Image: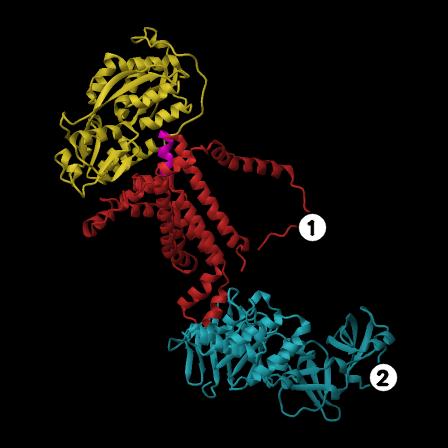
Amino acid sequence: MRRRVGPDQQAVPWPLGVPAAVAVLFLLVPLLGLVVRAPWRGLHRIVVESQVVDALRLSLLCASAATLISLVLGVPLAWVLARARLRGIGLLRALVTLPLVLPPVVGGVALLLAFGRVGLVGQYLHGWFGITLPFTTPGVIVAETFVAMPFLVVTVEGAFRAADRGYEEAAATLGASRMTVFRRVTLPLIGPSLVAGSVLCWARALGEFGATITFAGNFPGRTQTVPIAVYLALEQDPEAAIALSLVLLAVSVAVLVGLRDRWFSVGGAP
Amino acid sequence: MHRTTRIVAVLALTTSVLAGCGGSSGGSRATKPTSSLSPSADKLAGTVNVFAAASLQEAFKALGKQFQAAHPRTKLVFNFGPSSGLATQISQGAPADVFASASAKNMDSVVKARAATDATPFVKNVLEIAVPPANPGRITALDDLARSGVKVAVCQAQVPCGAVAAKVFRNAKITVRPATQEVDVKAVLAKVKLGEVDAGLVYVTDVLGAGAKVTGIPIPADVNASTSYPIATLTKAPNKAVAQAFTDYVLSAEGSAVLTAAGFQKP
Amino acid sequence: MTGPEVLDVAGSLDRGTFRLDVALRVEPGEVLGVLGPNGAGKTSLLRAVAGLTRLSSGYISLGGLVLDDAEARTFLPPEDRPVGLVFQSYLLFPHLSVLDNVAFAARSHGVRRGPARTHASEWLERLGLASFADRKPHELSGGQAQRVALARTLAAEPRLLLLDEPLSALDARIRLDVRTELRRHLHQFGGPVLIVTHDALEAMVLADRLLVLEDGRVVQQGTPAEVARRPATQYVASLVGLNLYPGTLARHEATVGDVVTLDAGGAVTVRSQPGGADRVLVAIRPSAVAVHTRRPDHASPRNVWAGTVASLEQLADRVRAQVDGVPPALVDLTPAAVAELGLHPGREVWLSVKATEIDVYPETAAV
């Protein structure tokens, strides 16, 4: 729902206005720095010559795949967390949302110990199926999913909680099975939250660095996503790093603006 | 217990990845390094920041301990990482007093940025193949790294160990497709220790420092390549006296002995 | 619809401190109105019949189909019951058009979109809603939404229809129209209908028979006329606007009638009662009570008592006075009479009722 502005717009009291202005500056000046210091003349050359295109393609692919996996696994998890009356569900919620507060690098270490070639699960993946995740593109997706999925789960779980159960009951009395109710009533009802959660998840995956470089290493075209490329380029060729950052910034802004027009303006209210 | 060492190894790796940089600080003109330990050593006091190549970690920590024992009122803060990354941080104004690089190239960029005037080579280092003790890839020689299916970790090309590795492969006329190009040599070593790769190309000093956690497979001298380590007291060093004293200590016979014991070669 | 089927409920539902205990039967084509105050268990009853709540004991059956049998552990989930429920707040799916809301049941049963929509259109046509087919629920008025909700439920072709406070969400000014139309649809429906309401008029107009629930128990059943004339509880009496006094038939006086000692204090003389019940209910219409400023000497002295006007309330064409006394009473007067008598809160008055205006019936007979 659009926020209504009252007829008598109040002046912002300064104890709120001043910190708010500082916050705006704090958030925008670094972005301004990127734009101002960007090597605009050489930008085309840098973008073409460096591994920007490869890294960007990989970043978009992996972030999208991670979001997809998060949707497939995370939405049912959110439903269970919101609806299942099981003992210890609170503890479960705390555990699965832990990556929200865990430093991503620690997440990467944990992933290595679990899914690495000699990890808890990884040794069997490797021994039985010949699958190794570290240093591969699927490894990047795993790392990004690990870090980003909780964002989706938390958002969607809240929506499941807030959703009016009456609609689901109404659907049941009309003869809809539980799965039909979920598919045709519950999911559409939480649609805006689903989109918001996916965007959050995707954005988090796109920016993922710590868990990715720890778990999936760095190899151009295979595991080197834009954030890693930016970090490494900064040591060698700061101009290329700025160019890469600009590209990522542009992509993020484009996605947010595109989604904002379609979804965010309608907000959560159906 | 085995797992614990793995975690420690990876955490060490991540620390080096995430090593930050600070703001700039004022300083004064560089002075010529004095040639030996100052007799007025007791007057040395204060903190100095030493930025050093990741491969120097064990040796410099040992040197630091001895230096601080000799000068109790000094405190050395080390920032170990990829030489290229450290060089960039210094050029961007990070508050460093001493820089020890794993290659002349990265030192040159610091000199070019006028953060240092001159540097002195103090050691040389050559590469060795590190494999996990179980040697899952059954590596016996350099040629094995080119086999398909063998997972190899090397340093990324812009850090010295990566550049030297490329040179070694060129000398041996083999094509190696690495699984990953890690940020610095310690990250390569960590992946070997964890058993995530079959082999990693690291310095002989790293194999020595890792003890039983990795097995070293020497590279024949005719194809091996070396890198020279220069050290410099930085022009904007906030604590130039102590900084210079430490640089001198590294260059001294005593320092040289510690470095040689760690596997480094004379320059 | 598959032949006439009787709804049979005899069961109970435990909800912590609240317990619903009900037995009822609804014939095909019959509309049973369930009347009761908030919290009486009306909605719980509907939910149990719809399958949204399980009985704690007892059973619910529709014709030969057992919907719930707590002892036999038989429970048909709501989606498998041939039961339609119109919710109090309608619960039209906000993301679907009116047409797709009405087509929802068919779609849920695997009918393809095209045929389901055709079927839905027919129902919209039948309820005069064809022009709203493409609207979203939030674009409907309250009355329209109520009709769409009814259409959606009827389109599922249930064999039993349940309505939960169908008109409570509507403005008073359109309630009359919607009620008239709803009455028509309910009587066209062939199966049993259960309609829950706390509005007496709604229940009287829509239902063939009433069942009054209070605190989870059935306190009265009967036709609307019976319930209106002889309410069994104070709640029902207040709904239908009667003074109701439980009392004990004290003595028989052949010449004047029987005397009833009221629980609320005082006594009234009534016409001689057949039967020998001791406990009785005394019902007096507010318009049957006369108000005097002085003690009347012409009336029978027995049904005269003093009181104080507690409040005056203007109703449509009359004034309702609440008079504190032994017993207290509601009295209906014309505005002219109020002026003539100079009534105001705090005024001492005398009340009188003719014995012939008093309805007396056994306390148990009403249930």
Report the residue that reaches farthest toward the top: B39
Q: Which residues are magenta?
A: A227-236
Label 1 marks which chain's residue?
A: A
In the displayed structure image, the side of residue C18 where residue C174 appears, left or right = right
Q: What's the colour of chain C in the image?
A: cyan
Query: Which label sits in the foreground, 2 or 1?
Result: 1
Disc 1 residue type (three-letter) = Pro
Q: Are marks 2 and 1 on the same chain?
A: no
The tag on residue A7 is 1
Which of the two residues, C104 or C361, is positioned nearer the viewer here? C104
Q: Which chain is red?
A: A
Vertical position of residue A68 compared to residue B175: above or below: below
Specify few, some or many for label 2: CA neighbours under 10 Å numbering under 14, 14-19, or 20 or more. Answer: few
Residue A231 part of the magenta segment? yes
Res A21 label: none
Quarter of the picture containing the C terminus of chain C is: bottom right
Q: Quadrant of residue A157?
A: bottom left
Residue at 39% x, 18% y: name it: B115
- Indicate the position of residue A257 as horizontal and vertical percent values: 50, 48
Label 2 amino acid? Asp
- C180 or A260, nearer to the observer: A260
* Residue labelled with disc 2: C297
